[in-house]
Amino acid sequence: MHDKENDNEAKAEIDAIIRAGVVMRLALVDGDRPWLIPLCFGYDGEKLYFHSSSRKGRKQKILEKNGRVCFEFEDGVQVKAAEKPCNWSFSFRTVIGEGVARELTDDEAKRAALTCIISQYAEEKWAPASLSLKGVQVWEIEIEEISSRDNRQD
């Protein structure tokens, strides 16, 4: 049973951590081997977005075969030293989730996703029509599972 207030608080915490993020780490499955890549991203509160200007890279080849992904964000990571090294710890907030990535092919959807990515990093507003789509691939991640952890310490 879920408490709606707690669900809203959890969603707010997840949104805050993602919006504070600079890098999304995306894990892909390459046959029977995992592969992890740091990426720029956008988040609209429901889906994640990322892009690439290369059509022949490893990421694209993997995603063509298997769109299942895992993603991670972190915020406020600090090492907390202690008298003994074995007592050291970390202070952090993190989000981890899973979903399915699919390439966007509609120009309007691609521009909206690129605008979302740009807004993650720039305060300046960009007109979607001014964004060039030449040679750019854009993906959205349909989030299936997501959770956060707050391990901040005084």
Image: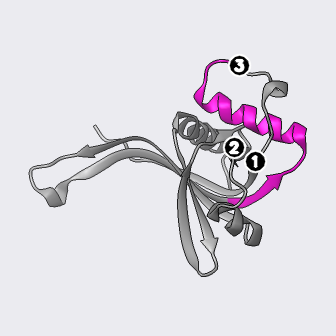
> Circle 2 sits in a helix, a strand or a loop, which is it?
helix
Q: Write the residue at 39% across / 47% down.
A: 151
Q: Write the residue at 62% across / 72% down.
A: 29
Query: For mark 2, what is the residue?
Result: 4
Which is nearer the eye, 1 or 116? 116
Query: For mark 3, what is the residue?
Result: 125
Residues at marks 3 and 2 touching, judged by CB atoms closer than 8 Å: no
The quadrant where residue 112 appears: top right
Question: Looking at the figure, which quarter contains the C terminus?
Answer: top left
Residues at marks 1 and 3 touching, judged by CB atoms closer than 8 Å: no
> Circle 1 sits in a helix, a strand or a loop, which is it?
strand
- What amino acid is labelled 1 in the image? Val
Residue 1 position within the rendered picture, expressed as x and y whole percent measured from the top left: 68, 57
Query: For mark 1, what is the residue?
Result: 138
Mark closest to the chain's N terminus, 3 or 2: 2
Which is nearer the eye, 114 or 54? 54
Residue ranking furthest to the top? 124
Residue 146 position within the rendered picture, expressed as x and y whole percent measured from the top left: 63, 54
- What amino acid is labelled 2 in the image? Lys
Region in magenta: 99-125
Label 2 vs label 1: CA separation? 34 Å
Q: Is residue 69 magenta?
A: no
Residue depth check, mark 3 versus mark 2: number of the one nearer the observer: 3
Label 1 vs label 3: CA separation? 19 Å
Q: Is residue 109 magenta?
A: yes
